[in-house]
Image (tube, rainbow, N blue to C red):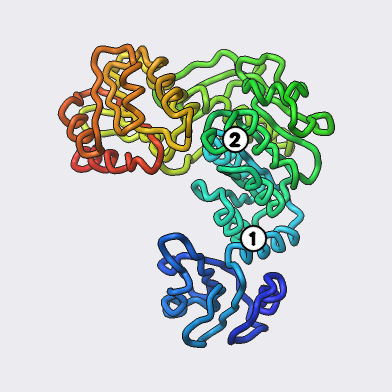
Amino acid sequence: MKIMEIVQITNGKLICGDENLEVEEFERDTRKIKTGDVFVAIKGEKFNGNDFYKEAFENGASACILSEEPKEKMGNIILVTDTVEAIQELAAYKRSLYNIPVVAVTGSVGKTSTKDIIASVMSMKYKVLKTQGNLNNSIGLPFTILSLKDEEAMVIEMGMNHFGEISLLTNIAKPTLAVITNIGTAHIGNLGSRENILKAKLEILEGLQGNTVIINNDNDLLNSWKENKVNQVVSSDKYDIITYGINNKDSNYVAENIEFFENKSIFNMGKEQFDVPVAGEHFVLNALCAIAVGRYFDISIDKIKQGILNLELSKNRMEIINLKNDITVINDTYNANFDSMKAAIEYLEKIEDKRKIAILGDMLELGEYSEELHRKIGDIINNIDILITVGNLSKYINENAKISQKFHCDNIEEATSKIIDIMNSGDVILLKASNSMKFSKITEELKKGRLL
């Protein structure tokens, strides 16, 4: 884009600089600025990006988009009313320039890992741009689209906490195919019910270019939506719905003869066998979803198999860390809600011939359902040798867990000390909690001096 285009699209004002200058990359972190980047000053609760425009220029920025008048005029500076709205408008414009497949992924749990495996499969046919990590909100998604260059397809993750958020994202990204992984309890404290969560997730259809949606048919609410049994949500009648599942045998894509191993899963679909390089039933579902997407884009079964094998998960999601003395750490600490924690526990419990230790922390944003859902997690724990819980809410997990060896810790430091004291050769240790619990600190302590 030229500077003048940015000014026109954002209804901004060029404070100083060359309106004919062409720019390409956009960045909001001055520490990551590369020569020629446009710095976008985001104003948050605890920081004000407008204060760093000089640093951005010093680090090589070619232009800055600000929402506050600069104290000094230098370089190329564009003044807009709201920089977040500005990048959303720029991303929507850039998206309009590309006629490429865009897969949008949403759901209560598994969005990031599903996005990763879909992108891996699609990369067997296209050069793919995908959401990095979980930059799936009103800021992260526009920056992803603004990084689009010569890619031939996009796989975009869409997250939300409230109504209206996915509506905004889908109308920027304009997906050509929508994927909904499940409807669970994440953010139920904000939305009040699973039915409201379904309604919020279905906002993804508002920007859909075409009418094809891929859903997890094992999920009760998604199945009910498909059958038009859910009140006060958009009708499914006008959509071509492709389904996948393990338990619902009426699905278009069904996994059978599933075998779980410590670090992989194997399943059959018809006469074909698929190897998933991550263990757990939820990753079998992710693989089925990726197969459905791959076939939609006419990718051959052999290519899809290779794409699944090539899967590289985003950081801190079912990351397997091998320590000395044959100790294995399952680092699933990026985030947690009832559904993802249940899946992680079920995976741990299926591991054989190992002492199994679960270190579980609070699940947040559950509102009035917090105690109930934490107690439900405790209720499902029955084949774990040692449980360590951390935090105010996880005490309910501890209270309901029907196992003999269990400990509750008030903080990360206490939990770290406890696990270091009790872990033995051959143990498998699961770490799972909401991101703000800072469980990554436990992971780092375990890594220190203990990696092979």
Q: Residue at the right extreme?
A: 238
User: Could you tell me residue 384's position as x and y percent?
Assistant: 32, 16
Image-quadrant location for residue 80: bottom right
Q: Residue at the left extreme?
A: 421
User: Could you tell me residue 217's position as x and y percent?
Assistant: 66, 22
Judge the density around disc 2: few (<14), some (14-19), many (≥20) Cα neighbours within 10 Å.
many
Which of the labelled discs sits on residue 88, or is there none? Answer: 1
Say above or below: 82 vs 447. Answer: below
Mark 2 secondary-structure assignment: loop
Judge the density around disc 1: few (<14), some (14-19), many (≥20) Cα neighbours within 10 Å.
many
Identify residue type, mark 2.
Gly
Name the image quarter holding the C terminus: top left
Mark 1 secondary-structure assignment: helix
Name the image quarter holding the N terminus: bottom right
The residue sitting at 45% across, 24% down in the picture is 373
Image-quadrant location for residue 16: bottom right
Which of the labelled discs sits on residue 107, or is there none? Answer: 2
The residue sitting at 67% across, 83% down in the picture is 20
- Would residue 364 appear left or right of 416 to someone viewing this image? right
Structural distance between the alpha carbons of marks 1 and 2: 22 Å
- Would residue 93 appear left or right of 32 to someone viewing this image? right
User: Could you tell me residue 173's position as x and y percent?
Assistant: 68, 52
If you read the primary sequence from the N terminus, does the residue marked by circle 1 or circle 2 appear first?
1
Which of the labelled discs sits on residue 292, or is there none? Answer: none
The residue sitting at 63% across, 35% down in the picture is 303
